[in-house]
Amino acid sequence: MKIRSKILIIAGSDSSGGAGIQADIKTATSLGVYAMTAVTAVTVQNTTGVKSIFSIPEREIYNQIVFTSKDIKPNAIKIGMLHSTQVINKVFNALTKIRIKKIILDPVMVAKGGFKLINDQAISLMKKKLLKKVLLITPNIPEAQILSGVKINTKEDMIFAAKKLVQLGVPNVLIKGGHLKSKKVDDIFVNKKEIKIFSNKKLNTENTHGTGCTLSTAITSFLSCGKPLKKSCELGIKYVNSAILTNPKIGKGHGPINHLNSMKLLKRYK
């Protein structure tokens, strides 16, 4: 497979390989995209939960982003785990310096097992500063509730919360609907001009570790190759659904999905 584009991933490491930087690299590679990384933290975890988190010094996170991009300019950037105000400020400064427009933020806040990955001060700074810097954010329902202040129980609540996030300055929002109790999963894309609902059958499995990381990187990969943003979201969702459906059933807890599921990317799209 020929490499079609280049992306930079700013995120934490997951020692179990199902989420974080590891999932991001697997996803990009599966989709024919070259992945560069800036590691923000090292987590010790497996499918049953997170044991500990070691923070990378924020200056070194800044250096990873700027020094890498100076040599190999990314076509797009995906941001995952940013766990402190210091890290968010340094990432913001680095993004300002390298001037990449196609940036997708997955506002990672809580691990699948319930372990909190970000503090309240960092969440507040993310809302005030970082949301205005990115093209798209991809929160799940708990994350969307925290960021918007809206309690979400229905599709209508999801749309209302997304509109609140647009008001905070982010131009596009994709709220993932997997936490709602229903037979379908409705992922809702919202900006100032339109609302698009992507509906898919809910797959009954515990093996969904890393779906959020994978989705945001898949979207970034498609976007980096020239696909429009809304189409990138549609294709990213299809990739993740296929990866869940073919999951390898690894581990004793929330197992990983199958990142080797791949979709061919073309340089130009009709």
Image: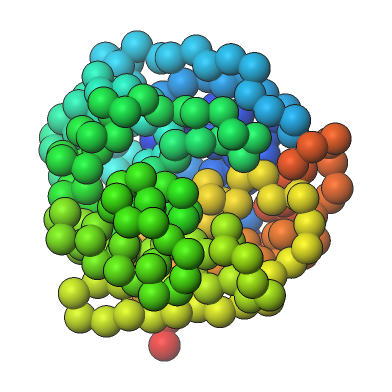
Residue toward you, 152 or 52: 152
Q: Residue at x 68, y 28 (%)?
A: 49
Q: Quadrant of residue 58?
A: top left
Residue toward you, 265 or 104: 104
Please, is residue 80 above or below residue 240 in the view?
above
Provide residue 148's location: percent of width, then percent of height. 28, 52
Please, is residue 20 above or below residue 222 in the view?
above
Q: Quick check: can you spot residue 35?
A: yes
Task: For the C terminus, give its image quadrant.
Answer: bottom left
Q: Is residue 182 left or right of residue 110?
A: right
Q: Quick check: can you spot residue 222?
A: no
Q: How is the image coloured?
A: rainbow
Q: Residue at x 46, y 55 (%)?
A: 141
Q: Is residue 113 left or right of residue 63?
A: right
Provide residue 1's location: percent of width, then percent of height. 62, 60
Residue toward you, 153 or 76: 153
Please, is residue 9 above or below residue 174 in the view?
above
Q: Quadrant of residue 123?
A: top left
Please, is residue 125 above or below residue 43 in the view?
below
